[in-house]
């Protein structure tokens, strides 16, 4: 209420006309009229006191009228300003600055974890937009200001004696001062929506709020979430502090330094300040300190990474703090409410609430897999773990291993591997189980290693055995580490046999090391025979037969394969082994016999192929049939078989085998002199191998593209594809790729015409793998 409106109310309550009040007070009728109509909002002190005496008001009403009279005399007469200095080295926030600049007024909430540079962004934006807000730019620190409204009124030029004592009066004065003004206000460190609603500027002003919370309850806001910097931006920030020459002199260590800093602007700034104050330190010295001391090393003056995170955690409920501490035990960076419940020993609902509270203060990031904890926040959580969390650690590992079993068994089992059954946990379908395994596949070595250290030996062995068919669906070198770790935990002979068989498969079919594979498989057979556990022997011998073929021992491979077939009991296993026999016959230059074997097996498999295992077995048989048909000089039939295999692998979502099938179909098209179609299939296969990170597949397909170019006499394309394959060899850098690189270099440097080059290339490519597709189950 204004002074004039309250004066009018008191005059009428007293039963006085304007003339009667004028006569009593000595104030003219015209002046009283102007005040009551709001034309005169700030009477002089003597005038105010005369009116108060004439109205005979009590002390409370007198104080209120005096305050309104003073308020009416206060105006914002010059631009207000309370911004910190311009932030010169802000990097990597151009997109966010553009968004703020495109808001002429209203509310912008900049939220994110501690140390992401929220305040620096807001201050930079205010300085850049100074010309658009002629009435000033203000910043109020809500984390450090005990009475923010009083601070704002002071910054707006209100003398201390004119500031109302109560919050309602301060708010009215604040609103009246900003009415019709163009001002930019930064509310730094807001904790609640109510703070913003109380202090937010008028609609014509722009209010920029910084907060560790999202403050999702604010109406009409634009939200900007800040995370870590990109690596180039983090390096740019470091160079701006320590000097470009220092960073350029050791770029590798500089990249490692910003990685250890989690690319957090605060952490990079602290690291830069420490290095700048110690110009003789090499960057590697600080890297060593951070690796040894972690967050304790990221302190410089009043800048402290750990302290910033502690503030975020301090105001959360006890359950949220417990969940956060236990996240320091996490394998990987992602957590679901179910896993958090296991870690903290609470219900899933309580865990979900805690994760949401941690997300609200930007200690976690929501994603399509649940929640993620990254960078230095994860390091902070790890530093909170103590001995009291050991049982939670065991509980989490046991949960992860049993979940692995529940997912793995859905892909099917063979031989003695069928002895593994899930215990309680279940997935609704194979697709959900596969998604979980895809997300955790690369974490399995760490999970198994930690579990072994906690004496969870049986859990480790069961989990690895349950994964046998999933491993075949998603082959990779990670499985060698998985099975070696599991072997160290096997306590029963049958477990050892199954795991040795799986390790033999990885060594032969994935790592292309048939000699070591055969040694492992021979040991598996001895263990099975000596222990009286023959339930998996058929599979041991089947993989051993493939290893013999990889060494060129084809007669022995055939003998062992027939022995494997005779040892199989399940029809699906027998059919698979018969198809492997067909592979051997093709390698023994008996393609027509191989075709017959594969056609008979495929006919049987089509009748029951529904599960992932059954579909994968059918896909392999069709793929091997296609290769045999190529060798039998029936390329069009080969294309048909491989196209059916492509459909099967698409249904089963077996991306690795899908890419391999497209590669082999390209060979069939080339055999039929359809080079354009061959190139198209090779391009699809190349994309597939690159997506899944199959370096050998990528290299082989590039060599096949070079072969097609050679067939057309395109020397430039031929050399370009070979050089791309050479670059891929150097990028992956394994024993196998180094051997291939030597062959490619020879092709590139040999004297002779294009025909000689093409012959050398095809010979090298054909000899690279003796059994395309191997015997993966």
Image: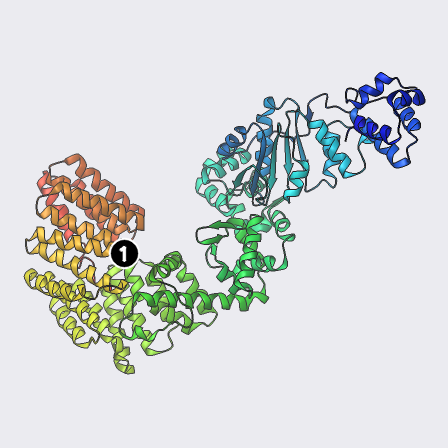
Q: Is residue 146 above or below residue 574?
A: above
Residue 680: name its quadrant. top left
Q: How many marks?
A: 1
Is 278 placed above or below 359 here?
A: above
Task: Out of 21 and 408, give the one closest to the viewer.
Answer: 21
Q: Which image quarter is the N terminus in? A: top right
For mark 1, what is the residue? 654
Question: Which residue is found at the position 25% from the left and 56% from the top?
Answer: 651
Seen in the picture, residue 94 relative to 696 is either above or below; the reply is above
Q: Is residue 30 left or right of residue 493?
A: right
Residue 418's image quarter?
bottom left
Tag 1: Cα neighbours inside 10 Å, few (<14), some, or many (≥20)? many
On the question of residue 54 being in view, the answer is yes
Image: 83 above or below 144:
above
Position of 667 compared to 241: left or right?
A: left
Could you tell me which quadrant the C terminus lies in? bottom left
Residue plotted at (83% across, 27% down): 7
Residue 47: x and y in percent read 89, 22
Q: Is residue 363 visible?
A: no
Q: Is residue 134 left or right of residue 289?
A: right
Percent across and percent down for residue 518 are 23, 68
Q: Which secondary structure lies at badge 1? A: loop
**In terms of depth relative to the viewer, which is nearer, 737 or 341?**
341
- Residue 639 locus on image (x, y percent): 13, 51
Left or right? Give the position of 686 relative to 177: left
Q: Residue at 35% of width from left, 62% of height from top? A: 429
Q: Residue 180: percent from the left, percent from the top?
A: 66, 24
């Amino acid at each position: 209420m204004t002074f004039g409106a309250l004066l009018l109310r008191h005059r009428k309550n007293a039963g006085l006309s304007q003339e009667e009040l004028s006569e009593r007070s000595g104030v003219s009728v015209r002046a009283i009229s102007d005040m009551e109509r709001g034309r005169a909002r700030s009477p002089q002190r003597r005038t105010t006191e005369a009116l108060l005496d004439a109205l005979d008001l009590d002390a409370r009403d007198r104080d209120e009228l005096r305050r309104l009279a003073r308020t009416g005399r206060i105006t914002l007469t010059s631009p207000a300003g309370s911004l910190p200095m311009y932030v010169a080295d802000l990097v990597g926030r151009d997109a966010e600055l553009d968004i703020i600049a495109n808001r002429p007024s209203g509310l912008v909430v900049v939220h994110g974890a501690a140390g992401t540079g929220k305040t620096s962004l807001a201050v930079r934006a205010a300085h850049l937009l100074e010309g658009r807000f002629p009435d000033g730019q203000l910043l109020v620190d809500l984390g450090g200001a005990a009475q923010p409204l009083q601070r704002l009124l002071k910054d707006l030029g209100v003398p201390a004696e004119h500031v109302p004592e109560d919050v309602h009066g301060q708010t009215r004065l604040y609103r009246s001062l900003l009415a019709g003004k163009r001002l930019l206000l930064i509310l730094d460190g807001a904790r609640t929506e109510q703070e913003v609603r109380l202090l937010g500027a008028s609609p014509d002003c722009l209010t920029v709020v910084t907060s560790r919370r999202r403050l999702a309850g604010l109406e009409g806001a634009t939200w900007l979430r800040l995370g870590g910097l990109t690596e180039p931006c983090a390096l740019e920030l470091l160079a701006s502090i320590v000097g470009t020459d220092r960073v350029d002199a050791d770029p590798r260590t500089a990249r490692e330094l910003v990685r250890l800093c989690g690319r957090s602007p605060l952490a990079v700034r602290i690291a830069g300040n420490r290095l700048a104050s110690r110009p003789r330190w090499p960057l590697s010295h600080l890297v060593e300190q951070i690796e040894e001391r972690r967050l304790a090393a990221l302190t410089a003056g009043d800048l402290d990474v750990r302290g910033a995170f502690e503030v975020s955690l301090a105001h959360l409920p006890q359950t949220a703090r417990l969940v956060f501490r236990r996240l320091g035990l996490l394998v990987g960076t992602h957590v679901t409410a179910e896993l958090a419940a296991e870690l903290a020993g609470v219900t899933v609902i309580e865990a979900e609430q805690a994760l949401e509270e941690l997300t609200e203060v930007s200690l976690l990031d929501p994603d399509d897999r649940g929640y993620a904890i990254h960078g230095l926040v994860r390091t902070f959580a790890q530093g909170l773990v103590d001995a009291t969390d050991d049982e939670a650690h065991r509980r989490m590992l046991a949960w992860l291993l049993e979940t692995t079993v529940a997912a793995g068994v859905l892909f099917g089992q063979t031989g003695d591997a069928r002895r593994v059954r899930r215990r309680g946990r279940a997935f609704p379908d194979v697709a959900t189980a596969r998604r979980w395994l895809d997300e955790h596949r690369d974490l399995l070595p760490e999970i198994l290693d930690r579990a072994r250290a906690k004496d969870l030996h049986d859990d480790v062995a069961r989990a690895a055995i349950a994964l046998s068919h999933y491993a075949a669906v998603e082959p990779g070198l990670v499985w060698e580490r998985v099975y070696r770790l599991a072997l160290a935990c096997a306590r029963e002979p049958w477990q050892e046999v199954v795991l040795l068989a799986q390790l033999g498969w990885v060594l032969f079919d994935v790592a292309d090391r048939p000699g070591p594979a055969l040694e492992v498989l021979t040991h598996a057979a001895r263990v099975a025979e000596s222990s009286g556990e023959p339930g998996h022997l058929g599979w041991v011998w089947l993989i051993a037969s493939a290893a013999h073929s990889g060494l060129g021992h084809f007669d022995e491979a055939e003998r062992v394969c027939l022995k494997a077939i005779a040892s199989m009991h399940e029809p699906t296993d027998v059919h698979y082994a018969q198809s492997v026999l067909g592979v051997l016959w093709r390698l023994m230059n008996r393609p027509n016999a191989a075709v017959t074997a594969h056609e008979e097996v495929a006919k049987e498999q089509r009748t029951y192929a529904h599960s992932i295992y059954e579909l994968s077995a059918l896909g392999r048989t069709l793929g091997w049939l296609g290769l045999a048909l190529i060798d039998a000089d029936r390329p069009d039939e080969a294309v048909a078989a491989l196209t059916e295999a492509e459909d099967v692998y698409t249904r089963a979502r077996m991306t690795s085998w899908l890419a391999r099938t497209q590669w082999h179909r390209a060979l069939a098209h080339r055999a039929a002199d359809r080079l354009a179609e061959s190139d198209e299939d090779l391009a699809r296969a190349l994309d597939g191998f690159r997506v899944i990170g199959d370096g050998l597949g990528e290299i082989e397909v590039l060599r096949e593209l070079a072969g097609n170019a050679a067939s057309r006499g395109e020397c430039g394309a031929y050399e370009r594809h070979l050089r791309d394959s050479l670059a891929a060899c150097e990028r992956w850098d394994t024993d196998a790729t180094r051997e291939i690189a030597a062959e490619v270099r020879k092709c590139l440097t040999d004297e002779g015409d294009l025909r000689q080059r093409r012959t050398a290339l095809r010979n090298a490519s054909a000899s690279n793998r003796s059994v395309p597709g191997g015997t993966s189950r």
